Image (cartoon, helix red, strand yellow):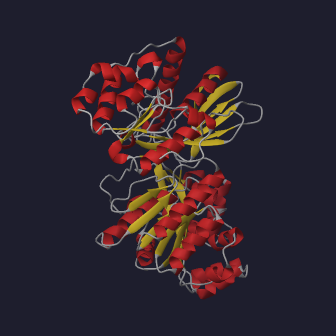
Amino acid sequence: MAPDNETEEEKNTEPSPEIQATSGGGSPASEPQDEITHSLGQLELYFQNGRKLLTVPGGTLNINDDTRRLLALFSDGSFLVSEAHKFDGRVLSFEVLARKKKLMIAKPVYVSQNELNAIYNYAERNAVDIETDEDLASLQMQKDFVNVVTRAAEKKVSDIHVVVADSTQIMFRINGMMSIEMEYNKDWGEAFVRAAFASADISDSNYAQNEFQGAQKLGSTPLRGSKGKLMLPHNVLAIRLQFNPIAFGSQYLVMRLLYADDNPNGSGDLSSLGMTEYEENLFFRLRSVPTGVSIVSGPTGSGKSTTLQRNMIKLLQEKNYEINLITVEDPPEYPIPGARQMPVTNANTEEEKDEQFTKALSAALRSDPDVMMVGEIRTLSAAQLTFKGALSGHGMWTTLHANSAPAIIPRLRDMGVETFKLCDPELVKGLIGQRLFRKLCPHCRISVKEQLNMPSVQRLKVALGDFGIENTYVRGPGCKYCDGTGIKGRTSIQEIILPDATFLELIIKGETRKAIDYWTSDLGGRTMKDAAIERMLKGYIDLDEVERWCGLMDQRPAY
């Protein structure tokens, strides 16, 4: 079980004599189970001399219950493993995790499942809560962390920004807009950031204030050091944390909140995201194609993952769950009932993430998929494997950071994907650009007829004439229905291209304007600006929101 190339420290870190005596250095199968699992004196030997069980719930190593059932690690490096699971991959993964966190871990001693259960029962029954001032301060910061996340979750905040400089500011991003919610002193902010790092389930071994670090906190696990008492709000599925050093300050933490699905019944309803019949029909046509690559693009926070998830649910429903849908995600953000969702784990640095993502994607391609969903194309290797899946006869769906649907092809070309692949309409099936637009509150919105002197209204009149003036609204002062904001949630707006050879050839040649004109005329396409104007004239979004995402009303779309 233990690697051959052990360090001297690991070789010298043998289980304590008491534990060897208890387990016999191997399987205790020959000994009476009652003597081992129920003898209080035997169990006390594991915990004498201040020895602590690191894997107990709420302990130093926050692991899931399935892994905990197989093993136990003590503070002196003693490592017990269930005899029946000595070759289980979860045990090996745990050893790798412990060494990454620079914890002592000796060669495994194999014991019975009953003995492991008895050890954990004893540890939990006899847990002593001796709280020093440092413990109390740490627990208070854990509580503050949960309170901030809870407050954000109640408002459906997408991101929490914590900026620690001379003072600490906590900002919430709600419906795409930033606002300052709380202010504290610098010391509190530094302690808060450390507590956030300590709470993470996936992170580097140590917090480094002057380095860029990423981490993840799962909503289903208790916070470390909380002894299972502190949990994230039930509607928060996970939190992605990004720690950054900043000039003229000490720390800058950004937390992306991933919410439990607002779609608990697993509905593939795309119209609830804001799609019209036109967009739904195009997505249906893409789902009907058995092979090829379809790509959803947009900036961070544009709803790409949600659109892809709903679309995959719809695909499975349309195929009566008779296909094998495999996803590769870093990390899985939302559940897709009926799909096999493969997470990318054991990766901290960008190089490791790239390596692990490529490894998972290669494994997925060898697992007999019909359709695959790749969470995001970040590297050339991921792009190449995605196209390899399409070349080998699979339907491939993924996301990409690109400015628009037409910009997807140049973005892939810039990453290094070969031109002959990008020119092939049998491979490139769908190009989708998406943004999230703030929706107007229907109770307090204001007609632009009341604000005719605004420059944006003058541009509207040039672009759409009196018809535009009659049917367009702007954000109102706020009311009880929108909590005084004038905004009632967000809606997704897409531009969707089902390209042919001519379109792809024009894009590859750099003749973007000709390609757009060809798409909107010969292929019957509709730009995001046209789609946004349609929603604007129906009163769903305001004039300023259209210009914010699509450019001025009296200008052509800038691609």
Residue 141 visible in rendering: yes
528 over 55 or under it: above or below: below
Q: Quadrant of the C terminus?
A: bottom right
Image-quadrant location for residue 368: bottom left
What residue do we see at 46% from left, 26% from top? 16
Q: Position of residue 251 (x, y in %)?
A: 68, 32
What residue do we see at 56% from left, 48% from top? 4
Nearest the viewer among 138 and 116 is 116
What residue do we see at 33% from left, 28% from top? 119
What residue do we see at 51% from left, 35% from top? 106
Nearest the viewer among 42 and 161 is 42
Q: Position of residue 381 (x, y in %)?
A: 62, 67
Q: Position of residue 270 (x, y in %)?
A: 40, 64
Image-quadrant location for residue 134: top right
Nearest the viewer among 116 and 42 is 42
Image-quadrant location for residue 9: top right
In screen coordinates, is 502 left or right of 294?
A: right
